[in-house]
Amino acid sequence: MTDQEEDFATLFAASLATKRLARGQTIEGTIVAIGSDVAFVNVGGKGEATIALNELRDDDGALEVTVGDRVRAVVVSTAGELTLSRRLALGAATLQQLEDAFQAGLPVDGKVERVVKGGYEVRIARQRAFCPLSQIDIARTSDPAVHEGRVYTFRIVEFREGGRNVVVSRRAVLEAQQQVQAADVRKSLVPGAVVTCGVASVLDRGALADPGAGVPRVLPISETWSNPCTPASVVAVGDRITLKVLRVEDGGKIALGLKQLQDDPWSKVQATYAIGQVRDGRVTRVADFGAFVELEPGVEALAHVSTFPPTGRAGGWARSISVGLTGAFTIVAIDIDKKRIGVAPVAEGTAGRDAREAADVQEYTERADAKASEGFGTLADKLRGALGTRDE
């Protein structure tokens, strides 16, 4: 290759490096030479950029870098030669740099001086800017004064009248950061992953859990062991809960579960429950054939309609109970394999008869278990037979 061809190749490579970079992009490079006014930075691909020396000096005027040092800076111009700015990224900005930052979409540091009508007065270096109330944060601020005196990173959204009218937005910077973080969070949300989420809100069908970076997902109440009247009885806004990613569906929809990280409550039923016991329970559902009673989170029993005192009216038993009602219930049947428990409500004033009634029920159940049993209807038969034996 001739010298002319090599020079052309070098210039061509440099032009390609310039085209690959965009204004506002943060890059790293190595200082290869220091001139009287600028430093030359190798940014790769045989491309070189310049950065003003006054941006590389400390408060005493001494250079902070030497040849061979790596620097991190922001691209402020790609027209002609590649121009970098480090001080803009550090928050010190002249009026010209602010205009460059506006054109390039660069972030700048500013201090919130005070609350003014409709927003805040922000000081960026020696320049004054305005930030609307809605642009100071992603979430609505109840007390605007909490931001006074704070130093934030802003994006200039308006630059008019030669810099006399500058409008900035912190929200734009936060949302851009959130989008990057959300992409990273989505990559980590794979089936089987365990994530800690904050409860963003509580809905009728479950809780809205946020794994982070604005990626909220609904945790259905069906994915918990509890069967509450309302999800609010299980979690509250602001709670931190650990969940398991069950699946990631087409379109990015993510299914979360809580009970998959906990032991199945039914694994302990055989050791902790026995026929004849009296347990406290809470009515969770009322059906035509009886009431479902939660004895503990994940362990639900059925109080068959035949176990309620007769009222002389069709469906009259249902008027004596309601969802959410708590009371004492006697265990009258247990089917571990099918995860079913039969209970009977304990009437007021009958506590003295509990032992005798429990013995009658257990005796009948043991006889019934000696025969083949099919379905939950057989459990209802047990309840009716037990009660009939007791009344004889």
Image (cartoon, rainbow, N blue to C red):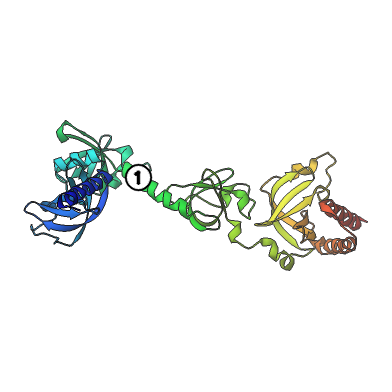
- Which of these two is toward me, 65 or 371? 65
Residue 340 horizontal/vertical position (percent): 76, 56
- Neighbor class of circle 1 (other Cα within 10 Å; few <14, some 14-19, many 20+) is few
Could you tell me which residue is drawn at 69 percent across and 66 percent down?
A: 268
Regarding mark 1 in the picture, which secondary structure is present there?
Answer: helix
Could you tell me which residue is drawn at 16 percent across and 31 percent down?
A: 161
- Which of these two is toward me, 3 or 10? 3
Residue 234 horizontal/vertical position (percent): 57, 52
Residue position marked by numbered label 1 in the rendering: 176
Residue 263 versus residue 200 in the image, above or below: below
**Residue type at numbered disc 1:** Ala
The outermost residue toward the top is 161
Viewer can see residue 109: no
Residue 86 horizontal/vertical position (percent): 19, 51
Residue 228 horizontal/vertical position (percent): 63, 50
- Which of these two is toward me, 248 or 390? 248
- 85 left or right, relative to 291: left
